[in-house]
Amino acid sequence: KGNVVRRMFADIDADIYVMADGDGTYAPEDAPQLINVLRTERSDMVVGTRRGVTDDAGRNGHAFGNRIFNRLYKGLFGTDFTDIFSGYRVFSRRFVKSFPAVSGGFEIETEMSVHASQLKLPVSEMALDYGRRPEGSSSKLSTFRDGARILWMFAMLVKETQPLRFFGTFALFFLAASIGLMIPVLIEFAETGLVPRMPTWVLSIGMLLLSMLAMMTGLILDSVSRGRAEQKRIFYLSISSGRAERPASGQALPKSEPGKAPRAA
Protein backbone atom coordinates (compact mmCIF):
# COMPACT_ATOMS: atom_id res chain seq x y z
CA LYS A 1 0.00 0.00 0.00
CA GLY A 2 2.75 2.42 0.91
CA ASN A 3 4.54 1.78 -2.39
CA VAL A 4 1.37 2.62 -4.33
CA VAL A 5 0.82 5.84 -2.37
CA ARG A 6 4.44 6.89 -2.89
CA ARG A 7 4.16 6.41 -6.66
CA MET A 8 0.81 8.19 -6.76
CA PHE A 9 2.08 11.21 -4.84
CA ALA A 10 5.18 11.40 -7.05
CA ASP A 11 3.49 11.07 -10.45
CA ILE A 12 0.17 12.89 -9.99
CA ASP A 13 0.14 16.68 -10.00
CA ALA A 14 -3.07 18.16 -8.59
CA ASP A 15 -4.37 20.72 -6.11
CA ILE A 16 -6.43 18.25 -4.05
CA TYR A 17 -5.74 14.53 -3.60
CA VAL A 18 -8.27 11.90 -2.49
CA MET A 19 -7.04 8.56 -1.13
CA ALA A 20 -9.37 5.65 -0.38
CA ASP A 21 -8.89 1.94 0.23
CA GLY A 22 -10.09 -0.20 -2.66
CA ASP A 23 -12.01 -2.74 -0.56
CA GLY A 24 -15.45 -1.16 -1.06
CA THR A 25 -15.89 -0.18 2.60
CA TYR A 26 -15.72 3.56 1.89
CA ALA A 27 -18.45 5.39 -0.02
CA PRO A 28 -17.24 7.46 -3.00
CA GLU A 29 -20.20 9.79 -2.37
CA ASP A 30 -18.45 11.05 0.79
CA ALA A 31 -15.47 12.43 -1.15
CA PRO A 32 -17.09 15.81 -1.97
CA GLN A 33 -17.83 16.34 1.73
CA LEU A 34 -14.21 15.64 2.66
CA ILE A 35 -13.01 18.00 -0.06
CA ASN A 36 -15.41 20.68 1.18
CA VAL A 37 -13.99 20.35 4.71
CA LEU A 38 -10.47 20.66 3.30
CA ARG A 39 -11.39 23.86 1.46
CA THR A 40 -13.60 25.55 4.04
CA GLU A 41 -11.41 24.76 7.05
CA ARG A 42 -8.20 25.41 5.10
CA SER A 43 -6.71 22.11 6.27
CA ASP A 44 -3.82 20.18 4.78
CA MET A 45 -5.30 16.78 5.60
CA VAL A 46 -8.84 15.62 6.31
CA VAL A 47 -9.25 12.14 7.81
CA GLY A 48 -12.50 10.27 7.30
CA THR A 49 -12.86 8.56 10.68
CA ARG A 50 -14.73 5.27 10.59
CA ARG A 51 -17.99 4.68 12.44
CA GLY A 52 -20.48 1.84 12.42
CA VAL A 53 -17.91 -0.87 11.71
CA THR A 54 -19.83 -4.05 10.90
CA ASP A 55 -18.81 -7.53 11.97
CA ASP A 56 -17.67 -8.44 8.49
CA ALA A 57 -16.03 -5.08 7.77
CA GLY A 58 -13.52 -5.31 10.56
CA ARG A 59 -12.54 -7.79 13.25
CA ASN A 60 -13.09 -6.96 16.89
CA GLY A 61 -9.36 -7.40 17.48
CA HIS A 62 -8.61 -4.79 14.82
CA ALA A 63 -11.02 -2.31 16.41
CA PHE A 64 -9.43 -2.85 19.83
CA GLY A 65 -5.94 -2.53 18.38
CA ASN A 66 -6.95 0.68 16.63
CA ARG A 67 -8.00 2.23 19.96
CA ILE A 68 -4.74 1.16 21.59
CA PHE A 69 -2.63 2.59 18.78
CA ASN A 70 -4.60 5.86 18.84
CA ARG A 71 -3.80 6.28 22.54
CA LEU A 72 -0.17 5.25 22.02
CA TYR A 73 0.14 7.77 19.20
CA LYS A 74 -1.22 10.56 21.38
CA GLY A 75 1.23 9.65 24.15
CA LEU A 76 4.21 9.59 21.79
CA PHE A 77 3.45 12.43 19.39
CA GLY A 78 0.98 14.56 21.34
CA THR A 79 -1.79 14.68 18.72
CA ASP A 80 -5.23 13.25 19.44
CA PHE A 81 -6.30 11.42 16.28
CA THR A 82 -9.60 9.54 16.40
CA ASP A 83 -8.59 7.02 13.73
CA ILE A 84 -4.96 7.10 12.62
CA PHE A 85 -5.43 4.02 10.41
CA SER A 86 -8.30 5.36 8.32
CA GLY A 87 -7.67 4.80 4.62
CA TYR A 88 -10.05 7.55 3.48
CA ARG A 89 -8.20 10.86 3.39
CA VAL A 90 -8.02 14.09 1.44
CA PHE A 91 -4.79 16.09 1.14
CA SER A 92 -3.67 19.48 -0.04
CA ARG A 93 -0.92 19.87 -2.62
CA ARG A 94 1.41 21.19 0.06
CA PHE A 95 0.98 18.06 2.17
CA VAL A 96 1.52 15.63 -0.70
CA LYS A 97 4.59 17.30 -2.19
CA SER A 98 6.29 17.67 1.21
CA PHE A 99 5.51 14.10 2.37
CA PRO A 100 8.50 11.72 2.02
CA ALA A 101 6.44 8.47 1.94
CA VAL A 102 9.08 6.08 3.25
CA SER A 103 6.74 3.27 4.36
CA GLY A 104 6.02 0.39 2.03
CA GLY A 105 2.99 -1.22 3.66
CA PHE A 106 -0.09 -0.59 5.80
CA GLU A 107 1.88 1.63 8.16
CA ILE A 108 1.73 4.48 5.61
CA GLU A 109 -1.20 6.12 7.46
CA THR A 110 0.92 6.33 10.60
CA GLU A 111 3.70 8.06 8.68
CA MET A 112 1.17 10.54 7.26
CA SER A 113 -0.10 11.37 10.74
CA VAL A 114 3.44 11.85 12.09
CA HIS A 115 4.30 14.11 9.15
CA ALA A 116 1.33 16.32 10.02
CA SER A 117 2.20 16.28 13.73
CA GLN A 118 5.87 17.12 13.20
CA LEU A 119 5.17 20.10 10.93
CA LYS A 120 2.11 21.13 12.99
CA LEU A 121 -0.10 21.13 9.90
CA PRO A 122 -3.82 21.91 10.16
CA VAL A 123 -5.74 18.63 10.24
CA SER A 124 -9.49 18.02 10.32
CA GLU A 125 -11.57 14.90 10.88
CA MET A 126 -14.99 13.89 9.60
CA ALA A 127 -16.94 10.86 10.81
CA LEU A 128 -18.04 8.57 7.96
CA ASP A 129 -19.98 5.33 7.77
CA TYR A 130 -17.82 2.26 7.29
CA GLY A 131 -19.54 -0.25 5.00
CA ARG A 132 -19.43 -3.98 4.41
CA ARG A 133 -16.84 -5.73 2.33
CA PRO A 134 -17.99 -7.29 -0.95
CA GLU A 135 -18.86 -10.96 -0.69
CA GLY A 136 -15.89 -13.23 -1.19
CA SER A 137 -13.32 -10.62 -0.22
CA SER A 138 -11.19 -10.70 2.90
CA SER A 139 -8.90 -8.31 4.70
CA LYS A 140 -5.22 -8.43 3.75
CA LEU A 141 -4.33 -6.98 7.15
CA SER A 142 -2.61 -9.48 9.44
CA THR A 143 -3.35 -8.76 13.10
CA PHE A 144 0.05 -9.76 14.44
CA ARG A 145 2.40 -9.26 11.49
CA ASP A 146 1.12 -5.82 10.50
CA GLY A 147 0.61 -4.87 14.14
CA ALA A 148 4.29 -5.62 14.78
CA ARG A 149 5.29 -3.63 11.69
CA ILE A 150 3.26 -0.65 12.88
CA LEU A 151 4.87 -0.84 16.33
CA TRP A 152 8.28 -0.91 14.68
CA MET A 153 7.29 2.09 12.56
CA PHE A 154 6.22 3.91 15.75
CA ALA A 155 9.65 3.25 17.26
CA MET A 156 11.52 4.36 14.14
CA LEU A 157 9.44 7.53 13.80
CA VAL A 158 10.10 8.39 17.45
CA LYS A 159 13.82 7.86 16.78
CA GLU A 160 13.68 10.16 13.74
CA THR A 161 11.48 12.91 15.20
CA GLN A 162 12.29 12.68 18.94
CA PRO A 163 15.81 11.21 19.19
CA LEU A 164 16.47 12.67 22.64
CA ARG A 165 13.42 10.89 24.00
CA PHE A 166 14.32 7.66 22.19
CA PHE A 167 17.98 7.47 23.20
CA GLY A 168 17.23 9.03 26.60
CA THR A 169 15.12 5.96 27.39
CA PHE A 170 18.09 3.70 26.70
CA ALA A 171 20.34 6.02 28.71
CA LEU A 172 18.07 5.72 31.75
CA PHE A 173 17.94 1.93 31.37
CA PHE A 174 21.73 1.59 31.23
CA LEU A 175 22.14 4.06 34.11
CA ALA A 176 19.71 2.12 36.30
CA ALA A 177 21.48 -1.15 35.46
CA SER A 178 24.86 0.41 36.20
CA ILE A 179 23.75 1.73 39.59
CA GLY A 180 22.15 -1.59 40.47
CA LEU A 181 25.38 -3.46 39.75
CA MET A 182 27.68 -0.84 41.24
CA ILE A 183 26.11 -0.26 44.67
CA PRO A 184 26.77 -3.77 46.13
CA VAL A 185 30.38 -3.61 44.94
CA LEU A 186 30.88 -0.16 46.50
CA ILE A 187 29.34 -1.29 49.79
CA GLU A 188 31.64 -4.30 49.90
CA PHE A 189 34.63 -2.12 49.05
CA ALA A 190 33.74 0.32 51.86
CA GLU A 191 33.54 -2.54 54.36
CA THR A 192 36.59 -4.58 53.33
CA GLY A 193 38.69 -2.30 51.13
CA LEU A 194 38.64 -5.01 48.46
CA VAL A 195 36.84 -5.50 45.14
CA PRO A 196 36.36 -9.27 44.96
CA ARG A 197 33.75 -9.06 42.18
CA MET A 198 35.85 -7.32 39.57
CA PRO A 199 33.79 -8.54 36.56
CA THR A 200 30.66 -6.99 38.11
CA TRP A 201 32.50 -3.72 38.65
CA VAL A 202 33.76 -3.68 35.05
CA LEU A 203 30.24 -4.44 33.78
CA SER A 204 28.75 -1.61 35.83
CA ILE A 205 31.33 0.84 34.45
CA GLY A 206 30.53 -0.38 30.94
CA MET A 207 26.82 0.21 31.54
CA LEU A 208 27.59 3.72 32.80
CA LEU A 209 29.61 4.48 29.68
CA LEU A 210 26.78 3.17 27.47
CA SER A 211 24.36 5.43 29.34
CA MET A 212 26.54 8.47 28.71
CA LEU A 213 27.01 7.49 25.06
CA ALA A 214 23.26 7.07 24.53
CA MET A 215 22.54 10.45 26.10
CA MET A 216 25.16 12.21 23.99
CA THR A 217 23.82 10.51 20.86
CA GLY A 218 20.31 11.70 21.72
CA LEU A 219 21.48 15.29 22.28
CA ILE A 220 23.38 15.42 18.98
CA LEU A 221 20.61 13.82 16.94
CA ASP A 222 18.02 16.06 18.59
CA SER A 223 19.78 19.09 17.12
CA VAL A 224 19.94 17.36 13.73
CA SER A 225 16.24 16.46 13.93
CA ARG A 226 15.26 20.05 14.73
CA GLY A 227 17.24 21.27 11.73
CA ARG A 228 15.56 18.72 9.46
CA ALA A 229 12.11 19.70 10.76
CA GLU A 230 12.85 23.36 10.03
CA GLN A 231 13.98 22.49 6.51
CA LYS A 232 10.84 20.42 5.91
CA ARG A 233 8.69 23.27 7.18
CA ILE A 234 10.42 25.79 4.90
CA PHE A 235 10.02 23.42 1.92
CA TYR A 236 6.34 22.94 2.80
CA LEU A 237 5.80 26.72 2.85
CA SER A 238 7.56 27.11 -0.51
CA ILE A 239 4.98 24.90 -2.25
CA SER A 240 1.99 26.57 -3.86
CA SER A 241 -1.13 25.88 -1.82
CA GLY A 242 -3.26 25.34 -4.93
CA ARG A 243 -7.02 25.32 -5.00
CA ALA A 244 -7.34 23.77 -1.55
CA GLU A 245 -6.92 27.23 -0.04
CA ARG A 246 -8.03 29.37 -3.00
CA PRO A 247 -11.69 30.34 -3.71
CA ALA A 248 -13.17 29.69 -7.11
CA SER A 249 -13.30 32.56 -9.58
CA GLY A 250 -15.85 35.17 -8.49
CA GLN A 251 -16.68 33.37 -5.24
CA ALA A 252 -15.77 34.05 -1.66
CA LEU A 253 -14.19 31.30 0.40
CA PRO A 254 -16.96 29.66 2.51
CA LYS A 255 -16.64 30.09 6.21
CA SER A 256 -16.21 27.12 8.53
CA GLU A 257 -18.99 26.33 10.98
CA PRO A 258 -18.51 27.75 14.49
CA GLY A 259 -16.50 25.45 16.70
CA LYS A 260 -15.05 23.47 13.78
CA ALA A 261 -11.86 25.37 13.18
CA PRO A 262 -9.03 23.16 12.00
CA ARG A 263 -6.49 22.11 14.56
CA ALA A 264 -2.79 21.92 14.14
CA ALA A 265 -1.53 18.36 14.37
Image (cartoon, rainbow, N blue to C red):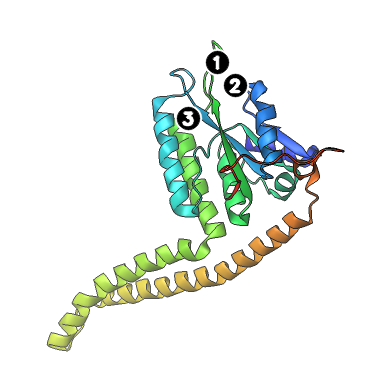
Q: Amino acid at mark 2?
A: Asp
Q: Which mark is residue 28?
A: none
Question: Residue at point 46% right, 37% down?
Answer: 147
Under circle 2, the secondary element is: loop
Q: Position of residue 220 (x, y in %)?
A: 56, 72
**Snapshot quadrant of residue 236:** bottom right
The answer to which of marks 3 and 1 sits earlier in the sequence is 1
Figure check: 119 above or below 51: below
**If you read the primary sequence from the N terminus, does the residue marked by circle 2 or circle 3 appear first?**
2
Residue 173 in the image: x percent, y percent?
35, 65
Element carrying mark 1 = loop
Dot 2 or dot 1, earlier in sequence:
2
Indicate the amino acid at tag 1.
Answer: Ser
Residue nearest the observer in this picture, 139 or 145? 139
The answer to which quarter of the image holds residue 120 is: bottom right
Kindly identify which residue carries mark 1: 137
Can you name the residue that lies furthest to the top here? 135
Provide the secondary structure element on which disc 3 rests.
loop
Residue at position x 73%, y 36% in the image: 17
Q: Which residue is mark 3?
A: 142
Quarter the N terminus occupies: top right
Give yes or no for contact between labels 2 and 1 (Cβ–Cβ under 8 Å).
yes
Q: Residue at x 25, y 71 (%)?
A: 181
Compared across the picture, whether 230 is left or right of 51 comes to right
Depicted 140 relative to depicted 137: above or below: below
Name the residue rendered at 50%, 48% in the picture. Answer: 154
